[in-house]
Amino acid sequence: MAQHYYERGEFEKALLSYQELLKTQPSNGVYFLRVIDCYQQLLQFDKAETALQERLTKFNMANLYVELGYNFQLQKNQEKADLNYKIAIEKIKENPSNVYGIASSFEKKVLLDYALEAYQTAISLDPKYKFNYQMAQVYGQMGKQDLMIEKYLEEMYENPQNSVMVQNQLTRFMNDEAGDSFNEMLRKALLVKVQKNQDLFWNQMLSWFFVQQKEYGKAFIQEKAIYKREPDSFSNIVNLAELAIEEGENEIAGEILTFILENTQDLDLQIFAQEYLMRIKIEKAQKSDYSKIESELEILLKQYGVSPYSLALQRLLAEFSAFYQNNPEKGKLVLQKAMELPLNKFQLAEAKMELADILLYEEKFNQALLYYSQIEEDLKNDVLGHEASLKATKKPVTLKPISIGL
């Protein structure tokens, strides 16, 4: 009820309700501060001051000096306000752990200079106190983006476990309407870190930044630098290739996939790279190139063998034969042979989906529907099952372009 009155601006009723609550829980700081706020909203500053002084005498909580100072500030008595704010800062010098309540109170009152002073005072007294994140947020509110960036970067470097939280904050500014200047500021800050510090952390951060900007080529440069010193980071390059493919950045995707082929012995990764390199090639091809592409696909299948491992290449050959060379019989034959292999249920569903697509293209609706229904039944709660269900209701198309997306 107290909250209801408060939110509706009925401060007299809210005050009475919070006072009743405070009688049952006299040590509750939230209820007390709401009482003070109600007094101030009602311009009853003397009552607020009396309550704050009594509370200070009883509980000796250092953050109450901020509240008392703010009560004077609301009365335009800045001299007494500053006096109490400085007392609050002195309380941090007496006991640095007071910084938590005091700095928080300053921030809530948007007394940002004092909030910074509170954090800096505690840090100067005891270096174990780390307030990079909090200070970054204060600098952000003050519009000092360069200092905000510096503090956020310090926080990530000193506490890598907080990197995602900080990246989320940085992303908000990067996506802002006026984000261009911020992005340039962040880019320069990261470049300076990379140049001055040999820690791969900064290369990783710079790569992350370029990915947010969809500058995958620049991100690739950083990932290669990381890989040279830390070969276990190869999965990051694979992830980058997938991102470039999803975004349709085929040129840089091709460069990354070629790099993957040159630097891995992993069969799955090799086939992944070969498949998407061929898809990129097919997308750019003219009809006069089709015969050569077909030969290249068949050579790849000879190289890797017709097995469950090379299913992606088999499906691609079937797609290409049916939809580009208008040879659905060959496409069906490739897939029928693939379905005789010891595939798992997901691989079998992928092969059936490809076959059903070709049958739909041939306007053999009943046969196509049969395969779609089988996939839907076998993979009820999977994306493939839902996709099959949707395709079963679609009308045939005259051409199915080969998709490069994952």
Image (cartoon, helix red, strand yellow):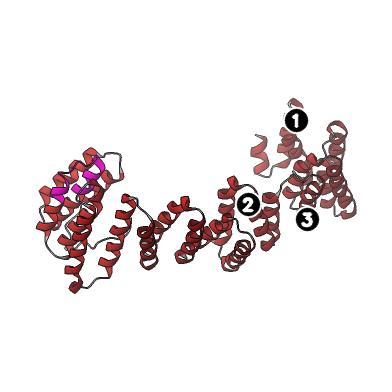
Judge whether residue 339 is colored magenta.
yes
| Separation of residues labelled 2 and 1 (CA atoms) | 44 Å
Q: Residue at x 17, y 43 (%)?
A: 341
Q: Position of residue 109 (x, y in %)?
A: 75, 50
Position of residue 121 measured from the top left corner of the image (x, y, whole percent): 81, 49
Q: Secondary structure at mark 3?
A: helix
Q: 229 and 60: which one is in front?
A: 229
Q: Horizontally, is 325 left or right of 265 in the view? A: left
Q: Is residue 10 above or below residue 291?
A: above
Q: Residue at x 14, y 53 (%)?
A: 334
Query: Disc 1 versus disc 3: distance between alpha carbons?
Result: 32 Å
Residue linked to disc 1: 22
Which residue type carries mark 1? Leu
Q: For mark 3, what is the residue?
A: 113
Q: Find out whether the residues at labels 1 and 3 contact each other: C-beta distance under 8 Å.
A: no
Residue 1: quarter of image: top right
Instruction: Kindly indicate the quadrant of the structure image that contains residue 20.
Output: top right
Q: Which quarter of the image is occupied by the C terminus?
A: bottom left
Q: Earlier in the sequence, mark 1 or mark 3?
A: 1
Crowding at mark 1 (Cα within 10 Å: few <14, some 14-19, many 20+): some
Residue linked to disc 2: 157
Main secondary structure type of the part rendered in magenta: helix
User: Separation of disc 2 and disc 3 at Cα?
Assistant: 25 Å
- Magenta residues, start to end: 335-352
- Where residue 74 appears, as percent x and y from the top left, is 81, 51
The verdict on residue 387 being magenta is no
Q: Is residue 359 visible?
A: no
Hey, what amino acid is under mark 3?
Answer: Asp
Closer to viewer: mark 2 or mark 3: 2
Who is closer to the viewer here, 370 or 280?
280
Q: Do the residues under discs 2 and 3 have CB atoms within 8 angstroms? A: no
Residue drawn where x is 40% and y is 55% of the image: 238
